[in-house]
Amino acid sequence: MTCIVVSWLLTVLGLGWSCSGEAPAVTSDGTPQRDRLRIECTSPMQWTGVAVSREKRIFVNYPRWRSGVTVSVAELLSDGRVRPYPSENWNSWSDTTTDFSGRLACVQSVFVDDKNLLWVLDTGNPYLQGVRAGAAKLLCVDLSADTVRRIYTFEDLKLSAPRYLNDVRIDTDARIAYISESGVGSLIVVDLASGKSRLLLDRDASTTSETGSFVVEGRALSLKIHCDGIALSRDKAHIYYKPLSVTELYRIETRYLRDTSLPAADLSGRVQFVANVGICDGMEFGTDGSLYLTSLEHNAIKRLSPDRTLVTVVQDTRIKWPDSIAITEDGILYFTTSQIHLGAGATDPYYLFSYTE
């Protein structure tokens, strides 16, 4: 999930999407992949996150980085309509809004957990001007009823600029939410039973980016985007994470993050380096235990196997800044493109791809 470089965010063109069916593509070795990579739909308005339910309902979010964002979270219906989700009221917005208890301000990511609940992460930071009072929140949405089941706020953390909530994963067994925070660099752990939040690995070497120079489609970028991509292992024993603008991938055992008796200062020594995986944004575990990662530098999706072998899964010139990944239980991989590196020079629509190995 990509965060906060205001000058690069695209001019919003409007709302809508269209289905395109199969699309030709090639992998890194030039092999045709027409039956594997598909453009599921396109949008004229910039999206970042994608989530897919058991029933293959598709949800996306549009961060309010600039004016013109008319909906924050939407379900993409099979007839081509965009349905504000979970309701129009939740997606109503005005620059004069001060009560955010029932409104979405700036949604960065969406995620469906293994109990088929949708989670919506609202940064509370519209226009990247700082977290507004009462606006940052995590919503748990019951997809069977299309209603908000519970709202979690972060008032105990007193979030303020430049904090930026980025991505979320849910351990439904332990009833814990893990959130990456990319503005300063940290992990946030939420006890879903009590609603209490803790800020951990704050400004740690593993959650921050000291350097930030990389190249995307020939454009040399100089950025420091801190803890961004995050994924919970299939056995729920580890959280994997990395700052966007470095190549290093890290992990830590979730039991340490859940242990409230463990001093926060002791966590750093329990972080494990995993591998150098390149510059990536979103990540997610597949059903076989492999970690799929977006590759910004190579217009690609890569896969890190359990033996830590890194390979390119699919590569295509249209995969411009692949952003977020969702993987269904039958192995279909969905991912968005957000084209952040192109700024106002972007000409392609925003794509939602699906890929089947």
Image (cartoon, helix red, strand yellow):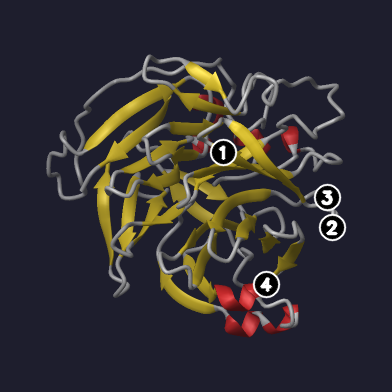
In the image, taking residue 181 as reference, residue 332 lies left or right, namely left
Asked if residue 187 lies left or right of residue 157, the reply is left
Q: How far apart are marks 4 and 2 (CA)?
A: 21 Å
Q: Residue 245 occupies which quadrant of the picture?
A: bottom right
- Please name the residue shown 37% across and 24% down the image: 41
Q: Which amino acid does label 1 sit on?
A: Asp
Q: Which-is-in-front pick, marks 2 and 1?
A: 1
Q: Which residue is drawn at 37% across and 36% down?
A: 55
Regarding mark 1 in the picture, which secondary structure is present there?
strand
Q: Mark 3 points at which residue?
A: 160
The residue indicated by pointer 4 is: 204
Identify the amino acid type marked 3.
Ser
Q: Residue 94's spot in the image, x, y percent?
A: 78, 20
Q: Image height check: is 276 above or below 139?
A: below
Q: Position of residue 179 (x, y in %)?
A: 62, 56
Q: Position of residue 108 (x, y in %)?
A: 61, 41
In percent of width and height, residue 231 lies at: 48, 59
Q: Pick out the residue farthest to the left.
A: 31
Is label 3 in a helix, a strand or a loop?
Answer: loop
Residue at numbered disc 2: 156
Q: Name the residue under label 1.
A: 142
